[in-house]
Structures are given as C-alpha cells and as structure tokens.
Amino acid sequence: MSKSNKISMSVVRRLPRYYRFLLELKSNGIYRVSSQALAERLGTSASQIRQDLNCFGGFGQQGYGYDVPKLFDEISGILGLDNQYTAVLLGVGNLGRAIINHVDFESRGFKLTAVFDSNPDIIGTQAGGMTVRDVAGLKEHCQSVKVDAAVLCLPKESAQQVADNLYQCGVRGFWNFSHYDLSLKYGDVVTENVHLNDSLMTLCCCMTEFRKKDGAESSVPQPTAKEKASK
C-alpha cells in the first residue's frame, strides 16, 4: 500500500471489476485463478492484470496464480471497504430512491446515516426503510454525526452551492449525480461525478462504430453461387 499514492485512476477504476469477479469466484467455491483466466473474464490482458496488481505488491505466485480469498481480501482492503465512511443522500426523487433502494452501501464501504429533501411532499415519506428528513436539518445532523461523504441527486443548478455548504459541515467526499461537474475548490475533497447520459451516449457511439464496420464489410461485393462453383 506504500505505492498507492502513485496509482493512476485508470488502475483504481479497474479494481471494483476485480473485486466483483473475485467475489463471484469465491461464492462459487473457486480458490485459485490465473492471471490469464482473470484477463479473459475481464476482457483485458494477463500482463495488464499483473501490472495492475503489482502496483500494490503483486499477490500472485508463479506457476500457481492467485489465491482467490486472499486476493479478494487484499483488494477489499485497497478499496477501503472496511472503513464504513458515514454518508448522507440529498434529493429523494426517482433517482435518489433508486439509489437508496438498490445500492448496498454497507458492503461498498459506506453507512448511509440519513436522507434529505426540500420538497414538503417528500419529507416524512419512507425510502429504503429510512424517513426522509427536511434538508433544513442537514447541518444539525452533520454536527451530531461526523459525515464523511454525500450522495447528490440534486438539480445541477443547486449542486455546487449544496456541496460548498456540506464542505463547511466537514463533508469531504461527494458521489455526484447532478449532471454538473463539481468544482474541486479545495485540495482535501474527493469527487466522483457520475453522468448517466454520458454512459448512454458512449454506448450509442460504440454501437454506431460497430454498425459502420458491419456496413463496410457488407458493402464488399460477394461472389455469386455460380462464381463459387466455378472455383
């Protein structure tokens, strides 16, 4: 872990994929895996797997591969999943409710302590077994519970101001779904901006490229049955 301060974000973003695959192997009672098998499952190369893991010390044994439970525990530690950072969620609309109901925060390193909204029709309702609180009480909650991170499911117009207010309350991590890239005004803040529309457009682009490729291939004249028979 002494090397972790030099790790590129491209490596960091691959770690959750390793985690998911190793969890699947572990759940299926598989206790050893090669870098080649990992690579085939993840759509990368064995050398890439080894390079990524060597950033943190390697963990593999030549001729044996990787001990699945051990590597799973190592990556869990690298990801910090045992830290149980405290979090709040702001904006309990459709997206906010979906995240509350379907994201397993505690197995991903966070404990969701409260959810907030400013809409009187939403305040007091239930979301994932939690009562939606009035955002007016956010500061008081942050004072009583040291909140490490915030999930923002807010309109983009208010995201930066809310983030600034949360920073004043001691919040230093932001999982931001507001479709607005939060400005990193402070050196001690970590922000993960999530753009679902960008992901969908990426899919659209990839499908378009494949279609162009298929169209180019299909435009090449193909021999007729008679021409094939004459060969």
Image (tube, rainbow, N blue to C red):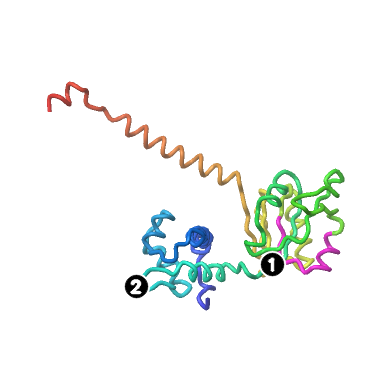
Please name the amino acid that badge 1 sits on.
Tyr
In-front residue for pair 188/37? 37
In-front residue for pair 223/24? 24
| Cβ atoms at labels 1 and 2 below 8 Å apart | no
Above or below for 118 versus 79: above
Q: Residue at x 61, y 49 (%)?
A: 195
Q: Residue at x 72, y 62 (%)?
A: 87
Q: Is residue 228 left or right of residue 107?
A: left
The image's mark for residue 62 is 2
Q: Which residues are magenta?
A: 138-151
Residue 4 appears at what percent x and percent y? 53, 73
Q: Is residue 159 left or right of residue 211?
A: right
Compare marks 1 and 2 and give the one earlier in the sequence: 2
Residue 171 appears at what percent x and percent y? 74, 65
Q: Residues within 10 Å of mark 1 (few under 14, many from 20)?
A: many
Q: Residue at x 51, y 39 (%)?
A: 204
Above or below for 183 versus 51: above
Q: Residues within 10 Å of mark 2 (few under 14, many from 20)?
A: few
Query: Could you say whether the residue bearing mark 1 is in a helix, strand or loop?
Result: strand
Q: Quadrant of residue 94?
A: top right
Query: Could you say whether the residue bearing mark 2 is in a helix, strand or loop?
Result: loop
Residue marked by disc 1:
85
